[in-house]
């Protein structure tokens, strides 16, 4: 028997989750619905801040612009979330959006608590206020396809189980992507805490879960977002639901959950040997608001 809409649970990563709908049958509103998508993005966009993680962002171009850099299939690029950097390989890039593959074992730089704890080991009431440092790691588990629709404030991650079968799709709410070319070429965004999980079971009527609403509230309490910005994040999630999640539209309808690369594309992608990466390795801060 399936759980009723409105049921709550604890996600695999330890956060709170609420069953808010099913593909093909509606969606429980997350926001108050009084803000447009453009207004919400404007409230959240901090790409002009001088202290933003990567100075290359100042020359980056919105992904929806005609003159935005384009990437070729097989090319290694960087996928950046503020100070978090991941190495990836391009599968497809066109006006609709960017599709990348992150092979298992690919390199990444991530910010972690300076005291040695894992990020999810830090309690919610201090998660955005503890000192942090950068740490090199790798993508573990099966490789993953990610899709970044041009100009939209989210990306979609297609997870697989160890045997290669679909595990579900993860809609990461984030700032619209910007692009830069060159030796450290790739995309920029900023994670906005709230996420949506689309379960792989019951094809055509999959359960849709809202994740980490409690973490978003903690981000407000610790000064990471204002209450108005948190509402803007909820607005973005609602727009994702209306645009493609509730209907199972693109890219959910392109079978990216089953796509597999050729062997040559499935080798781990390293970080480039560049001054940008060297500088990123040395970053640290006293809270999430620094660095």
Image (cartoon, grey):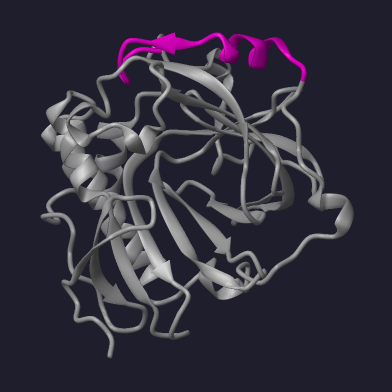
**Viewer-proximal residue, 224 or 174?**
224
The question of residue 282 being in magenta is answered with: yes
> Would residue 36 be seen by someone viewing this image from the given angle?
no
**Location of residue 92 (image quadrant):** bottom right
Decide: is 83 above or below 148. Answer: above
In the rendered structure, which segment of residues is drawn in magenta?
273-291
Q: Residue at x 55, y 75 (%)?
A: 253
**Residue 206 % position (x, y):** 39, 79
> Would residue 193 be seen by someone viewing this image from the given angle?
yes
Q: Residue at x 32, y 50 (%)?
A: 14
**Viewer-proximal residue, 12 or 159?**
12
* 72 left or right, relative to 123: right
**Viewer-proximal residue, 229 or 88?**
88
- How many marks are shown on the rendered structure? 0
Farthest residue to the right: give it. Answer: 264
Decide: is 92 above or below 286. Answer: below
The question of residue 232 being in magenta is answered with: no
**Location of residue 136 (image quadrant):** top right
Q: Residue at x 39, y 77 (%)?
A: 247
Image quadrant occupied by the N terminus: bottom left
* 2 left or right, relative to 231: right
Q: Residue at x 80, y 52 (%)?
A: 266
């Amino acid at each position: 028997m399936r759980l009723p809409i409105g049921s709550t649970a604890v996600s695999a990563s330890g956060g709170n989750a609420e069953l808010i709908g099913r593909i093909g049958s509606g969606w429980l509103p997350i926001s108050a619905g009084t803000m447009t998508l453009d207004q919400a993005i404007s409230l959240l966009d901090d790409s002009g801040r001088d202290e933003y993680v990567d100075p290359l962002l100042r020359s980056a171009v919105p992904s929806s612009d005609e003159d935005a850099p384009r990437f070729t299939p097989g090319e290694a690029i960087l996928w950046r979330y503020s100070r978090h950097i991941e190495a990836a390989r391009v599968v497809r890039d066109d006006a609709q959006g960017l599709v990348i593959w992150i092979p298992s074992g690919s390199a990444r730089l991530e910010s972690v608590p300076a005291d040695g704890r894992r990020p999810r080991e830090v309690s919610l009431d201090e998660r955005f206020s503890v000192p942090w440092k950068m740490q090199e790691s790798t993508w573990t588990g099966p490789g993953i396809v990610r899709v970044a629709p041009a100009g939209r404030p989210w990306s979609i991650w297609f997870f697989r189980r160890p045997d290669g079968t679909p595990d579900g799709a993860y809609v990461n709410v984030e700032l619209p992507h910007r692009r830069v070319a060159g030796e450290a070429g790739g995309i920029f965004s900023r994670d906005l805490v709230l996420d949506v999980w689309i379960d792989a079971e019951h094809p055509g009527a999959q359960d849709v879960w809202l994740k980490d609403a409690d973490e978003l509230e903690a981000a407000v309490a610790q000064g990471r977002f204002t209450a108005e910005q948190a509402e803007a994040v909820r607005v973005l999630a609602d727009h994702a639901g209306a645009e493609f999640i509730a209907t199972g539209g693109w890219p959910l309808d392109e079978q990216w959950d089953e796509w597999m690369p050729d062997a040559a594309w499935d080798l781990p992608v390293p970080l480039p040997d560049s001054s940008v990466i060297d500088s990123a390795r040395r970053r640290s801060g006293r809270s999430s608001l620094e660095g």
